[in-house]
Image (spheres, rainbow, N blue to C red):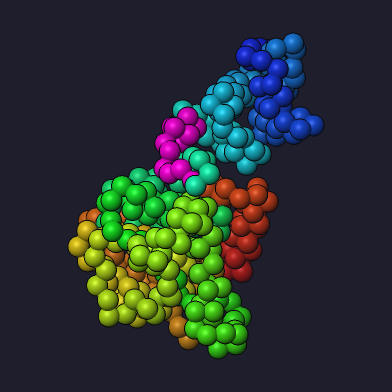
Amino acid sequence: MDNIELAIEVDNLEQLIELFGAFDENVKVIEKETGANIFSRNTHVVITGRREDVELAKVVVDKLLGMIRRKESIDLSRIRYAVELAREGNADAIEEIMTDVIAITSKGRPIKSRTLGQKRYVKAMRENTVTFVIGPAGTGKTYLAMAMAVVALKNKEVERIILTRPAVEAGENLGFLPGDLQNKVDPYLRPLYDALYELLGGEAFAKLSERGAIEVAPLAYMRGRTLNDAFIVLDEAQNCTEEQMKMFLTRFGENSRVVITGDITQIDLPKEKKSGLKQCLSILEGIEDISIQYLTHRDVVRHELVQKIIQAYERYEKSTRR
């Protein structure tokens, strides 16, 4: 197949620098993923190679330049994801993902979906009373749920936010931690506090907590309660027993929304206990107003190495099952 050359004009040198990245690391990834060759010529990005490779690279570069013009940050994992979408014929989805602002942090930073999986997850939370989301670490399961909860509270759609987790972690036991009960459970709830501080700011979080508009508590505190007018997030649900999950799912009342997050590959329950999350996914499938969303390594938004680690573990687990 004959080689071709295409040139894309950029608005200014700053855009060109941001597109290429430090030591041309961004362009090297695009070249590796598409097979095309990319270099700069004055204020143009020049792409050469086989026609199909050049056309794929052009779509990716166009979309990345669009992100740069909208002041969106680009990193290596986003670039690889853009190539994947372009290769699948889903290039327009790159812009769709970027235009939906979910919330604004206390410092004015917009929170947006970064993958199609995250976009579907956010849509499910908006449209359903109960949303389950299953996926590996780093896919934004908890953070996006917290963002939606804060937006619902600010918009007066609910009167309070309730965040809960089972107090179970690998290799640890509450009885061995120092301090009173609150001191013992705080380490388990720390990721929830951290997300709230970023979304609301420390002062606003403290005020809302004082008047009871935000409650962060271990799952055991939910027993016997009816939770009305609340946005309820159950995090790390894979560590709920079957009894705990049934208890939790029968707590919410009128005008409440529920989000349940979990990673069924990281169950820390004792061997004799079965995960209530795995059980309820099959029991509740197909019920109207309950959505079950799945995220994968493609939706990981942490360091790109996290994606590779998750994929390596998936391959290992498949080989051991065989």
Closer to the camera, 283 or 99?
A: 99
Closer to the camera, 214 or 266?
A: 214
Q: Residue at 40%, 66% (x, y): give it.
A: 210
Residue 102 percent coordinates (x, y): 41, 43
Looking at the rendering, which quadrant does residue 123 occupy? top left
Q: Residue at 50%, 69% (x, y): give it.
A: 189
- Indicate left or right for 41 with 193 as reference: right
Q: Is residue 233 above or below residue 38?
A: below
Looking at the rendering, which quadrant does residue 256 occupy? bottom left
Residue 165 percent coordinates (x, y): 45, 71
Closer to the camera, 148 or 309?
A: 148
Q: Give the range drawn in magenta.
A: 93-105
- Indicate left or right for 293 with 308 as reference: left
Q: Residue at 45%, 46% (x, y): give it.
A: 118
Closer to the camera, 71 or 10?
A: 71
Q: Is residue 227 above or below residue 100?
A: below
- The quarter in which the N terminus is drawn is top right
Q: Residue at 25%, 61% (x, y): give it.
A: 229
- The quarter in which the C terminus is drawn is bottom right
Residue 255 percent coordinates (x, y): 22, 58
